[in-house]
Structures are given as structure tokens and as C-alpha cells.
Image (cartoon, rainbow, N blue to C red):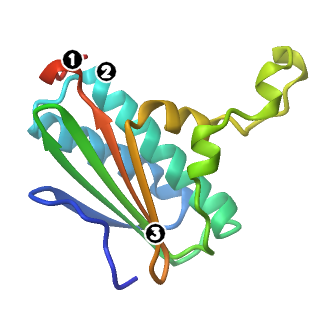
Amino acid sequence: MTTSPQAPHGERRVFTARLAALPETADFVREFCAREHIAHPVALRLTLVVEELFTNTVTHGHGGDCGATIVIGLSAAPTRVRLGYADAAPRFDPRPCLRTPPESLSAPAAARPAGGLGLHLVGQMASRVRYAYRGGNRLALTLTIKDGNPGA
């Protein structure tokens, strides 16, 4: 992968597209949030977003574990956290899934199929999402920290 996500004044890390690397992504987010003094509730939301994107890339984008790379970049400002995410999976623009709840959401819980809610949940947590395909999928997401309060 030649292009990495934008993470100005932030950090980036490269992971192998294997589900076994998922705990490493959570460690990266946790360590970043600790250094940036980002409160635990925001760190949990950010971790959930990263885990959902990573799992979808490996499972659906690549069809399982492989040697491809996934690049994650993080940067923080007083009122927001930016996440850059890049993978080499086939083209997939997740924005429609982020904005529209799945039809199964209105069904009783017992009748809903497993899965299908993760990207919608990511869309509920991100205040801004940009997508481009440049030799791979590139996402830039912003999570807002309310009123500059990292605990919000």
C-alpha cells in the first residue's frame, strides 16, 4: 500500500490483515488516547470504530486473513479525534451503510439476522466521514469530543 491515511501531527501504524492483529489495533488506540489524555468513553468509541472497520476489511474485504496491510492513523485536537484508515481490499465505499440503518433494525431483536449493524453504529459515532479510492480504500473519520471535554 503506497498511500497512507492523513494523520497530521498524529501517529500511524501498519497492521497485517489478520483477525489475530485485532488486539494490536485496540492497544494502539488505547496507548494513543492515554498519551493524548482522551477520556475513557471517547477511547472506547474510537476502539469500537477501529475494530469494526478492521474486522470488516479482513472478513468481507479480503475474505479472511491475508498478508495485505491496513494502515491506521490517529490525530487529536481539543474538540475532535481524527481517524485515517486505509486498506488494499476491493473498492468499498461504506458511507451509504453509515448513514442508513439496516432494514432489520425495525424487526424484533429475536428476528434480526446476526451482523449488519456495525457500520451503522460507526456512522452514529462519526461526525464526519470522507472516502476515496486511491489504489485502495481510504477513509477519514472525525469523532467529536463535546465542548472540548474529552470525557464527553
Q: Which mark is residue 142?
A: none
Is the Cβ of the residue at disc 1 closer than 8 Å to that at disc 2?
yes
> In the displayed structure, would residue 92 be above or below residue 152?
below
Query: Residue 132, which numbered label?
Result: 3
Q: Which residue is mark 2?
A: 41
Question: What is the three-letter code of the residue carrying label 1?
Answer: Gly
Q: Residues within 10 Å of mark 2 (few under 14, many from 20)?
A: few
Q: Estimate how packed mark 1 is, as few (under 14), some (14 to 19) or many (20 or more) residues with alpha carbons within 10 Å.
A: some
Q: Is residue 104 left or right of residue 42?
A: right
Q: Nearer the viewer, mark 3 or mark 1?
A: 3
Task: Give the SS element for disc 1.
Answer: loop
Distance Cα–Cα, label 3 vs label 2: 29 Å
Checking the image for residue 151, the label placed there is 1
Along the polypeptide, which appears first: circle 3 or circle 2? 2
Q: Where does the N terminus fall, quadrant-wise?
A: bottom left
Mark 3 touches mark 2? (CB < 8 Å): no
Quadrant (top left/top right/bottom left/bottom right) for the C terminus: top left
- Residue found at the very far right of the displayed protein: 111
Residue 66 rendering spot, x and y as whole percentages: 58, 74
Kind of residue sitting beneath label 3: Ala
Query: Quadrant of residue 85 in the image?
Result: bottom left
